[in-house]
């Protein structure tokens, strides 16, 4: 959380509606008067919110997005959790969404080919599914409402240049997997850590290790930050998903079939749209 009271309220309401008993929340520091005023509203929302036990950490120095995400995950695992779900302040959990994460983290814990669970599904991509399938396997990871396990997160590398060098070492071309990630991976600003972004390394790690993110057939996350209010994503309609048709109470975790064609579908979609969610390289 940082500067968007209305978004924060919607995100907390989504968590409460899913019956989640307890969450850890983080409020980043700012010395800007206009942000301080919004943070007073956020604190009022958090302190008076009913139906959800919130443990709030209020930063006393500026962390930024990347450090906030990394430390939130590392803190959860340092406290003994074997898995964690992370929602930024504009990722609203739809009804039944917690079941997707809860079931997946349990059912796939020992499947080391699965690195992440992603609650948001890219729209208008016409992915291929088995007739009875309600889950999708992709190498491409999405940051908008996700989860992973402690042992997978241990492999996260802060230094993007190191991850890119591993592709060179084994003779992989990032362009073969993702043209938008290839552009960012050639940017001096990104390679030197001069942009407030954490996710490129994690996205590339899925490709590098041939591990997967699992998505629900229908998104369980509403991204309400596509209105230009966020630090990185431009105001765009292209990522907006329709409303879910049904709440799935039990997913078919045994029916995880992989279709290579889906990688080409998401590759083409993100070649056009992927850089809309990042600072200019």
Image: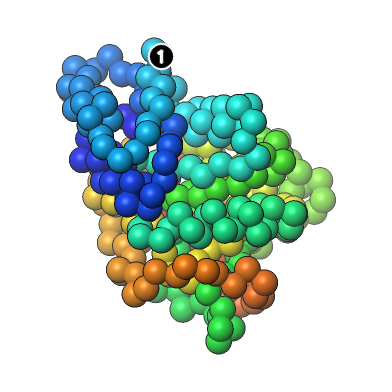
Quick one: quadrant of the N terminus? top left
| Quarter holding residue 157 | top right
Snapshot quadrant of residue 107: bottom right
Visible residue check, residue 203: yes
Instruction: Report the front residue among 280 and 73.
Output: 73
**10 Å neighbourhood of mark 1: few (<14), some, or many (≥20)?**
few
Q: Nearer the viewer, residue 37 or 254?
A: 254
- Could you tell me which residue is drawn at 55 percent across and 48 percent down? 147
Residue shown at 41%/14% (left/top)?
Answer: 61
Residue drawn at x 51%, y 44% as measured from the top left: 85
Residue labelled with disc 1:
61
| Residue most extreme to the right | 170
Q: x%, y% of residue 4?
A: 24, 35
Left or right, 66 with reference to 28:
right
* Residue 33 relative to residue 209: left or right: left
- Quarter where residue 256 is shown: bottom right
Front residue of 154 and 210 = 154
Residue 186 left/right relative to 221: right
């Amino acid at each position: 959380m940082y500067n968007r009271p209305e978004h924060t309220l919607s995100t907390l309401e989504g968590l409460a509606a899913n019956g989640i008993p307890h969450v850890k929340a983080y409020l980043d520091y700012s010395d800007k008067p206009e942000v301080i005023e919004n943070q007073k509203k956020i604190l009022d929302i958090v302190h008076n919110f009913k139906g959800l036990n919130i443990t709030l950490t209020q930063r006393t120095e500026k962390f930024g997005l990347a450090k906030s995400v990394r430390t939130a995950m590392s803190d959860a695992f340092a406290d003994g959790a074997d898995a964690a779900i992370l929602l930024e302040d504009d990722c609203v959990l739809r009804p039944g969404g917690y079941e997707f994460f809860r079931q997946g983290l349990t059912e796939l814990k020992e499947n080391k080919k699965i690195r992440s669970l992603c609650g948001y599904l890219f729209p208008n991509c016409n992915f291929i599914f088995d007739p009875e399938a309600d889950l999708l396997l992709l190498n491409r990871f999405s940051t908008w409402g996700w989860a992973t396990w402690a042992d997978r997160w241990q492999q996260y590398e802060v230094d993007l240049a190191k991850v890119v060098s591993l592709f060179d070492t084994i003779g992989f071309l990032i362009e073969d997997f993702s043209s938008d990630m290839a552009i960012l991976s050639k940017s001096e600003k990104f390679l030197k850590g001069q942009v407030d972004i954490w996710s490129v390394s994690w996205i590339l790690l899925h490709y590098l290790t041939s591990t997967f993110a699992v998505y629900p057939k229908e998104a369980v996350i509403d991204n309400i930050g596509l209105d230009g209010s966020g630090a990185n994503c431009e105001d765009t309609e292209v990522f907006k998903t329709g409303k879910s048709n049904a709440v799935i109470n039990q997913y078919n975790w045994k029916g995880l079939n992989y279709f290579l064609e889906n990688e080409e579908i998401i590759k083409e979609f993100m070649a056009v749209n992927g850089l809309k969610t990042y600072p200019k390289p």
